[in-house]
Image: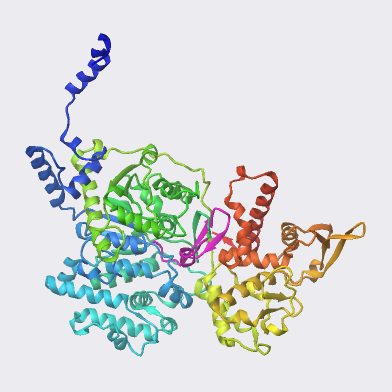
Amino acid sequence: MSGTPSDMHISEKDQALLEVLEKRTISCFDLLPHDDMREKLVDLVLHGSPAGITTEAATLFGELRERLISTRVDDAKVVVFGGGTGLSNIIGGDSRQKNWSDKPFEGLKKLFPRTKAVVCVTDDGGSTGELLKDLPIFGLGDIRHVLVSSIQRRLLEARYNLSAGQSLALVKDISTIFNHRFTARPESAESLLQNCYVDLDRLPPEMIGSFVSYLDFCLKDEVCKSTLGRPHCLGNLLILSVIRMAVGDENLSGDRIEIDGSIGEAINGAISNIGELIGAGADAVLPCTPVPAQLRFRYSDGVEVSGEHKSSGAERGAAVAQVIVDFCGRPFVSEKVLDYIRAADVLIMAPGSLYSSIIPVMQVPGIAEAVRENSGALKLLIGNLWVQEGETDKAIVNPNRKFHVSDMIRAYEHNLSGGVDGLFDQILCLSMQDVPASVIQSYAVEGKNPIYLDRELIKSRGFVPIECGFFSRTALRDRGVIQHDPEVVAQTVKTLLLARELFNGKEASRQTTVTSDRSGGLPARPRLVPIPSLKFTKVAERLGEITIDLDQCETTGMSSDEILFILGDVIWNHQDIPVSHLEYIEGITCVSENKWRRDQRWDNVFSFYDPDDRLIKIREDRLQTTDRLEVSFLIALGQALLGDYAASKLITPLLYEGKEIGAVYHLSLRSEDERFCYFNDAELRTFLKLARMVEQTPTHFTRTVNGKEGFTPPGLLLGLMYAWYLDNRFATHIEYKMSILKVRPTHLIPEQKKMRSRRERLIDFLRESVFGKEAVLL
């Protein structure tokens, strides 16, 4: 051993360190993982005592764990906010899964039988979307989904005097009936129920009698039966029927929905009645508002897209910046819903679609305020496990990185007046250590990534992260998916509630001070939007006035009726298209490929709007598939908004010393009083400048083209931008041009910055003057 004598002596600093270690008393809780006491207790309940501890410590931990598990919380009042799969799953499991009926009585409803679900009503896909085409009703799909998941064994057995085995068999039949889908108009209530392949004799007489009564009403009611020719989910029809029986025609008619307290309570009561009929608690499921509503997504590039179903399949390539709930009438929330929130012991933001389930509920006037008023409740945000395509696959702060838990918090801040203040302070997050590495790897291969916990950042904001392995091993084994385990989530919530009482104001229940981040600005104001069913009717009426000329087609795979049906669905799927956009077309003419004479020097678009006869001309091969027809129609519809704005168009050569070095495109405008155009004069001139047309005189615009370069004339540009704005997959060359918006301005040279600014202003024009011109703010 070498070294000087001084090297072989303990320093005063080292001696002080030893003295500190000698005096330190180690708590048994220090043997549990995590730093926060709440996480330690959750870990103890979920995983038991840690390995390698003394017998005495193991006994004490075991006793504490048993008390936490066995203590009943039946009287605790819980309110959960959300929608769809995430909400139903934590309340009682995903009732749409075939194996749900194997264990249908687990989840929050088991430990907290007084649980109430406040459900988002903006669903517009599937059977719900079909209902919205015919009826002035809010989205019922999520209501149905959560209602079945809310069935409680105790209530079902008490109401119908059933044994445990009988209740298990009955809940399987109920889920089969409520999830049954049909496509043909039913002949009778009995035949519709028989087609569910359920032994109806096993159902309690009261239940089957009520189902038949509800469906009989639906088959006779003039409003309900109008929708029976469409594909539907039987559960939606049952809920629709009880609502229609409780609320008359006079309350669901007119150009806007006006709902007051009595109508709202009647709707809530109808849903509660059918819920109690199938074994859910009274008011177990409540719509966040009975007023029909629609989601509007604002992306980071400025594009706005309306509709929950459409947004779920969007591939905009930009992060969601904001979501806004637009209403078909004055927003209304039931006083009963607000009272349940104010009196709750536990308030939970359920996992699920961040922008299309949770935030929209909080945007309904009065709900977030009621949550903040309840200062005594345990307030939890249950984080999602994986990113959701089209919503949380890109972070607004940095679209190039994956979504973090802090991004979820930031989304609340940017979309709710008042931000997250008073909404939640503890956040349940997935512990990635508990997920098998092979699962994470297989998900990554499919492009799916977990939402990462940036613990220190969210702690610095005043939130408490509770990290635990609350995913379902059963779902992973049976279906290969990672989703929340209803039993584990319920036990975790219960442990956190008991922890507040155990420590009586000490560390485990201390209040946090949440700091706000309002860098995203104030939330956008909601709009008054048309009732979907009324708009659908008006679109159908307008399309019925449009002529379809197929005489010039040599071959076509579609009839006139099929084309009109497809166009009706196209406009329904793109809710941003107002009915007024159809006023500029008189018909559609199919042109054979042999007779197609349109100049294709500038593009490969095989449709256009002809202002002379106000007809859309489409080359016949565009009618071979629905997708081709949709794109061709939308491009021409966008062009039609310019109407006959141009008195003349001319291209002249640009000469220099007798040599042609380019061309000049000349555009002469009609006078404003002679113009048939969607835009007013100021809007038209704004667009022409964005199309890089230069004003020479008030009626003469030009565009210089260098050499043999091509360019996009204003009409074609508007058509392509119109289609791209509605779905960026429709115009790939516009998508290419818009890719510059994904580059930070600081990385661009001055000319590129000008280009970027021009394209931002072009998007602003489409959002405000094309699709938002007729918007009415609430």
The residue nearer to you, when weighing 187 against 53, is: 53
In the rendered image, the residue lying farthest to the top is 5
Magenta range: 288-315
Is residue 388 located in the magenta-colored stretch of the structure? Answer: no
Residue 244 position, x and y percent, is 38, 76
Instruction: Name the outermost residue toward the right.
Output: 657
Q: Position of residue 299 (x, y in %)?
A: 53, 56
Report the side of 377 relative to 111 (left or right): right
Q: Answer with the quarter of the image where residue 761 lies.
A: bottom right
At a point 67% along the width and 90% down the height, the residue shown is 551
Please check the rendered image and state whether residue 306 is part of the magenta-colored stretch, yes or no.
yes
Image side of residue 505 versus residue 637, left or right: left
What residue sits 63% from the left and 63% below the top? Answer: 733
What residue sits 17% from the left and 22% below the top?
Answer: 23
> Where, quadrant-wise, is the C terminus in this rendering?
bottom right
Vertically, is 401 above or below 148?
above
The x, y position of residue 260, in whole percent, is 43, 65
* Residue placed most toward the observer, 584 or 252: 584
**Relative to 422, does residue 263 appear above or below in the rendering?**
below
> Can you say which quadrant of the picture contains the N terminus?
top left
